[in-house]
Every structure is written in structure tokens, then in C-alpha cells.
């Protein structure tokens, strides 16, 4: 597939201002302040499941690993987020990409398994879980993006996902008889809660850049601050589990200047609009430094998530290095 015209995220990122970094142990967060001009009206999936207006099940009694069925009876659209965990049924899954479900509709949604050792019903319906680590989401984003561009299917490299989950369980010192990411979250709840207690959601922030040991780990931005406020506890636990899994090796400090350089770099990348399972378009972006996706509905970026591109085939010595365009221009002169 070839993009019909040049599309970048610059118009969505230009409305942002960068707040003061804050952190706990080896995790630093940089808030992004702002709001899209025309935020979209939706419910979050966790709230919709809790209210009984969203039911997520296996696609059939036999099930299919990379796909689930979401049935909405809500009057509003419902937003499921990249990396969001769904717990239960025949095995736990995470969303392969952000999907905006139409109101009162049935939609098949693309997922990856994060519980390798179980394929039997523990419940008929899925409940809401946490968020995957930024490292797992990064690798998944890269494989899903390439499959979308090649075949139009938002499928992941399932073997790579299972490997990332196993590393997460081992790295956090947890154990799981079924290889479930959810078990690591539950067994390390005290440590994760300590991060969450120290990292309150900044007022007015619509997004956040996370760094671990001074290195960029993830960017999540939403169309309005209310969404970040609502998903903050689960999102930060995902970042924190990643931080726990990585040694607290001495590293640099991720600053406002680094955040600005990252935003400018992301805003320059030409995105490829791909079909979405729900409402809107799934914009995919990839450069030697970063990889990610955005759900764009009309003139609004509902959710943007960006990660380091640590593909070994594209890795630069020393890891991803991102500078502001102005810095790169000065360097060339």
C-alpha cells in the first residue's frame, strides 16, 4: 500500500507544551500539556466493561488467538487502547493497536496472547486488566505495523510477544505456571503501587513521555486530558513494570530538551494511513530511531503511542539517538 499524500503528526503535536519532568527511582515522566481542537466523544473500554455495555469474548467456542469479538450496546463509541490487557476467557490478550468501536455494534478486534500456557475457559467474558510494558508494546508495534503495510492485517509476531512476556516475568522476579503477564503484575503489585504513589497524574496533561535509566521508553498522547487521567494508574504500572525489569544502571537524565527533540522528530516522520478495525485510520510511523502508531479520526488524533525502534536490523551503535531538527541542521552546517 502506498500513502495517497504526505501525512505527518506535526499538526497534532504542535499544540503541545512540555511540563517539568518528575520521577521515581529509574522511571522519569515528562508531561505533555494540551488538548485536540475537536476531541472525540467515547467511553473507555475498562469503564464500558464495568458498566456492562461492552462484552468481549472469544470469536467462537473454539476461539482464535489473534482475534476477539467486542459487542457494544453503548450509545457512545468505545475506545480500546494499544497494549491494553483483557483478562479471562481462554487466555489473556492485549490489544495490537488502538481501536475505536462504533456505538451499538459487533467488531472483531486484533489481539496478541500474553498467557502462553493456557487455552481453556476460565470465564466466558473478558475483564479489564493492566497495560503491557513499553518494551513489549514497542516490539509489537513494529511487527503489527509491517503486517498492516504488507497485508492490511493488524497481526503481531506472536512468538516475539511470548518471548517478551517470559523476559518480563523473569526480569521482575515473578513466576507464572501459564506464562501470564498478569501474574507478574499481581505479584509485583507492592512495587508497582510505590511507583504509582510517587507519580501522580499532572493536572491538564494529555500525554506523557516515559524514560527508564535516562533513555526514552514510550510516549502516549490522547486527544484530551480526561483520558490520560482515567487510564493513568494502569498505564503507569505498565511503565513501572518495565522499569523494574531493567537494572538501575547509571544513565543520563531525560530532560525537557530531550522531550522537545523527540516531538519534533516524530512530527517530521511521514505516516502511512492503514485500515482500522473500528472508526478512523491507523497511522503507522517508523524511522531508524522510533516506531509507533496513531489512531486518527477526522481531524483529531485520538491516541498516539511511540517507542524506541530497537530492531536489530536497524539499530545504530549506542541505540536510538534523537535530536531536534534545528540541532541536526546546525550539525550539518
Image (tube, grey):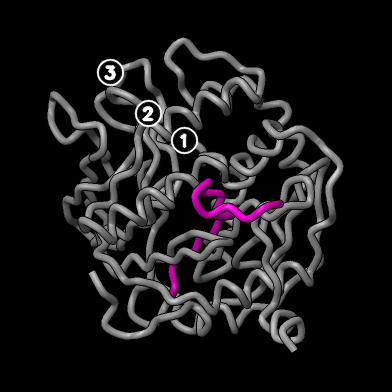
> How many labels sit on residues?
3
Q: Viewer-proximal residue, 329 or 251?
A: 329
Q: Tell whether label 2 touches label 1 (CB within 8 Å).
A: yes
Q: Which mark is residue 92?
A: 2
- Range of magenta residues: 301-318
Choose top left, top right, bottom left or bottom right for residue 274.
bottom left
Crowding near pointer 3: few (<14 within 10 Å), some, many (20+)?
some
Q: Which residue carries the number 1 mark?
A: 129
Mark 1 vs mark 3: in front? 3
Quadrant where the C terminus is found in the figure: bottom right
Q: Residue at x 67, y 52 (%)?
A: 317
Residue located farthest toward the bottom when viewing the structure as drawn? 333
Q: Residue at x 58, y 54 (%)?
A: 308
Quadrant where the N terminus is found in the figure: bottom left
Choose top left, top right, bottom left or bottom right for residue 101.
bottom left
Q: Viewer-proximal residue, 85 or 306?
A: 306
Crowding near pointer 2: few (<14 within 10 Å), some, many (20+)?
many
Q: Is residue 99 magenta?
A: no
Mark 1–mark 3 Cα distance, whole angstroms, equals 18 Å
Residue located farthest toward the top when viewing the structure as drawn? 177
- Which of disc 2 and disc 3 is earlier in sequence? 2
Mark 1–mark 2 Cα distance, whole angstroms, equals 9 Å
Horizontal arrangement in the rendering, residue 81 relative to residue 282 (left or right): right
Tell me the element at label 1: strand
Q: Which residue carries the number 3 mark?
A: 119
Q: Position of residue 193 (x, y in %)?
A: 71, 34
Q: Residue at x 26, y 18 (%)?
A: 121
Q: Position of residue 22 (x, y in %)?
A: 81, 56
- Which of disc 3 and disc 1 is earlier in sequence? 3
Amino acid at each position: 500500500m502506498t500513502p495517497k499524500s504526505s501525512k505527518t503528526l506535526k499538526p497534532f503535536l504542535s499544540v503541545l507544551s512540555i511540563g517539568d519532568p518528575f520521577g521515581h527511582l529509574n522511571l522519569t515522566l515528562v508531561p505533555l500539556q494540551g488538548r485536540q481542537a475537536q476531541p472525540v466523544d467515547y467511553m473507555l473500554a475498562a469503564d464500558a466493561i464495568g458498566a456492562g455495555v461492552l462484552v468481549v469474548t472469544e470469536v467462537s467456542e473454539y476461539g482464535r488467538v489473534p482475534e476477539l469479538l467486542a459487542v457494544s450496546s453503548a450509545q457512545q463509541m468505545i475506545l480500546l487502547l494499544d497494549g491494553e490487557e483483557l483478562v479471562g476467557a481462554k487466555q489473556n490478550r492485549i490489544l495490537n493497536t488502538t481501536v475505536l468501536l462504533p456505538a451499538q455494534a459487533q467488531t472483531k478486534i486484533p489481539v496478541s496472547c500474553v498467557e502462553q500456557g493456557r487455552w481453556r475457559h476460565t470465564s466466558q467474558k473478558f475483564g479489564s486488566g493492566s497495560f503491557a510494558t513499553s518494551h513489549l508494546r514497542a516490539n509489537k508495534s513494529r511487527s503489527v505495523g509491517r503486517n498492516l503495510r504488507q497485508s492490511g492485517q493488524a497481526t503481531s509476531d506472536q512468538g516475539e510477544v511470548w518471548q517478551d512476556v517470559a523476559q518480563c516475568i523473569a526480569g521482575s522476579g515473578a513466576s507464572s505456571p501459564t506464562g501470564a503477564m498478569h501474574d507478574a503484575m499481581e505479584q509485583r503489585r507492592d512495587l508497582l503501587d510505590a511507583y504509582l504513589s510517587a507519580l501522580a497524574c499532572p493536572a491538564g496533561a494529555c500525554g506523557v513521555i516515559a524514560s527508564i535509566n535516562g533513555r526514552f521508553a514510550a510516549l502516549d498522547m490522547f486527544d484530551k486530558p480526561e483520558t490520560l487521567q482515567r487510564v493513568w494508574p494502569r498505564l503507569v504500572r505498565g511503565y513501572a513494570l518495565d522499569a523494574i525489569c531493567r537494572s538501575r544502571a547509571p544513565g543520563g537524565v531525560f530532560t525537557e530538551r530531550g522531550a522537545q527533540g523527540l516531538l519534533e522528530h516524530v512530527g517530521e516522520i511521514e505516516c502511512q494511513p492503514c485500515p482500522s478495525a473500528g472508526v478512523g485510520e491507523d497511522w503507522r510511523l517508523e524511522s531508524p530511531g522510533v516506531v509507533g502508531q496513531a489512531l486518527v479520526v477526522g481531524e483529531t488524533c485520538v491516541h498516539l503511542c511511540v517507542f524506541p525502534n530497537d530492531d536489530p536490523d536497524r539499530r545504530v551503535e549506542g541505540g536510538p539517538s534523537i535530536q531536534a531538527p534545528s540541532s541536526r541542521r546546525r550539525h550539518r552546517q
